Amino acid sequence: MSTHTTTANTHGHFLPNDALKSAAVLTSLVKTVNTWVKRHQGREALLHLDDRMLADIGLTRADAYMEVRKPFWRP
């Protein structure tokens, strides 16, 4: 005989623990990809700043180029 463990989600519905684990993994993956996209967009935005704007945030043009060259997964 097989037993299935269930847990109530935030809406009061009961889901098998495997489904909850899968949902947690998917949620984590979505958050990670979102972080990567934002990081890439922020780095690309540096290329559009002039030298004065870069200096205002404490960066040189060389710093901006180095930042943009980083892979999206590297902080």
Image (cartoon, grey):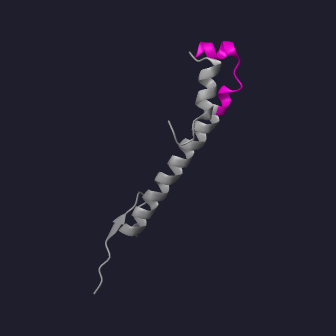
The residue located at (56%, 45%) in the rendering is: 34
Q: Report x, y in % for residue 75.
A: 50, 36
State the residue in front, 67 or 8. 67
Q: Quadrant of residue 19?
A: bottom left
Residue at image point 36% right, 63% down: 8
Please tell me in which quadrant of the rendered image residue 5 appears.
bottom left
Q: Residue at horizontal 61%, vertical 38%? A: 40
Q: Nearer the viewer, residue 29 or 43?
A: 43
On the image, the x and y values in percent for residue 30 come to 53, 52
Examine the rendered structure and indicate whether residue 49 appears above or below residue 3.
Answer: above
Q: Magenta: predominant secondary structure element?
A: helix
Q: Position of residue 69 (x, y in %)?
A: 61, 34
Image quarter of the N terminus: bottom left
> Which stretch did the figure color magenta?
44-57
Q: Is residue 48 found left or right of 34 in the rendered image? A: right
Number of numbered discs overlaid on the protein picture? 0
- Can you see residue 13? no
Q: Residue at x 69, y 27 (%)?
A: 47
Above or below residue 15? Residue 24 is: above
Residue 49 placed where, x, y %? 69, 21
In the image, 41: left or right of 33?
right
- In the figure, is residue 27 to the left or right of 72? left
